[in-house]
């Protein structure tokens, strides 16, 4: 007998899977086989009916979450480039071409000369992290859940979009039950 949720082999005496915790079909009741239309909306009469969507919480949200993280990575790149452009333009008091070009020392207040490259590096790191989270969730990598939780905690300070995405990610992936479900899905792919 196999678990219907994660596919691991289990014995017939158990009521819950030892790996993912999903309820297992109750042993058939003795008696003649039941004929006629199925009861419980398509389930055989001897199987208990679970709550709708039970055990599929992570699976329902994983693709949406992966796409949102990829979009968030693009948002971070565009927002960072626009921010660097305006910082460079207003700090130097002229329209000076692409944000990475030009003389960083002339006309800048003390300490501002290194700010544009620092912002550029931070934008690249944040964007690569968000893109890695999106990729790992979409491809169901075993390390994707942990990376997503770390990135979600870091994104909480980036109000409002980062905060919303961070809360959504933590609500779906942080519970221990979600970890077991994600691990079961990651092992199959």
Image: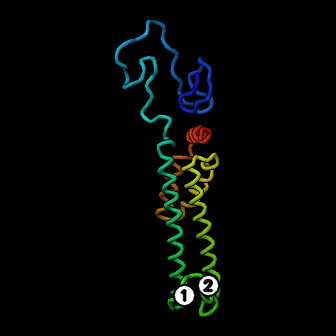
- The number of numbered badges drawn on the structure is 2
Question: Residue pushed farthest bottom?
Answer: 107
Q: Earlier in the sequence, mark 1 or mark 2?
A: 1
Number of other residues with Cα within 10 Å of mark 2, as a class: few under 14, some 14 to 19, many 20 or more: some
- Residue occupying the point 54% across, 83% down: 98
User: Where does the image place residue 39, in percent across and percent down from the top left?
Assistant: 37, 20
Q: Are marks 1 and 2 in contact (CB under 8 Å)?
A: yes
Disc sitting over residue 112 in the figure: 2
Seen in the image, is 41 located left or right of residue 118?
A: left
Residue at 38% x, 12% y is: 35
* Residue at the left extreme of this rendering: 37
- Separation (CA) of disc 1 from disc 2: 8 Å
Q: Which residue is at the far top?
A: 31
| Residue 145: image location, x then y, percent | 60, 48
Q: Residue at x 57, y 65 (%)?
A: 127
Return the x and y of residue 123 as percentages of the image width and height. 58, 70
Is the residue 89 above or below the residue 140 in the image?
A: below
Q: Secondary structure at mark 1?
A: helix
User: Which of the 4 quarters of the picture holds residue 100?
Assistant: bottom right
**Residue 158: percent from left, percent from top:** 52, 65
- Image quadrant occupied by the N terminus: top right
Quadrant for the C terminus in the image: top right
| Disc 1 packing (10 Å; few <14; some 14–19; many ≥20) | some
Residue 166's label in the rendered image is none
- Is residue 28 positioned above or below 18 on the image? above
Q: Nearer the viewer, residue 35 or 124?
A: 35
Element under label 2?
Answer: loop
The residue pinned by badge 1 equals 91
């Amino acid at each position: 007998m196999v678990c219907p949720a994660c596919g691991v082999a289990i014995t017939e005496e158990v009521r819950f899977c030892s790996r993912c915790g999903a309820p297992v079909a109750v042993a058939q009741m003795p008696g003649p086989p039941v004929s006629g239309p199925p009861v419980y909306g398509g389930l055989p009469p001897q199987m208990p009916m679970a709550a709708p969507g039970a055990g599929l919480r992570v699976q329902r949200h994983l693709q949406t979450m992966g796409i949102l993280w990829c979009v968030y990575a693009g948002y971070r790149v565009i927002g960072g480039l626009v921010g660097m452009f305006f910082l460079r333009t207003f700090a130097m008091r002229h329209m000076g071409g692409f944000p990475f070009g030009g003389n960083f020392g002339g006309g800048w207040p003390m300490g501002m000369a290194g700010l544009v490259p620092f912002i550029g590096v931070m934008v690249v790191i944040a964007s690569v992290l968000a893109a890695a989270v999106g990729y790992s969730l979409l491809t169901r990598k075993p390390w994707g859940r942990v990376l997503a939780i770390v990135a979600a905690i870091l994104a909480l300070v980036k109000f409002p979009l980062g905060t919303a995405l961070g809360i959504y990610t933590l609500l779906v992936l942080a519970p221990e039950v979600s970890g077991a479900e994600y691990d079961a899905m990651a092992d199959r792919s």
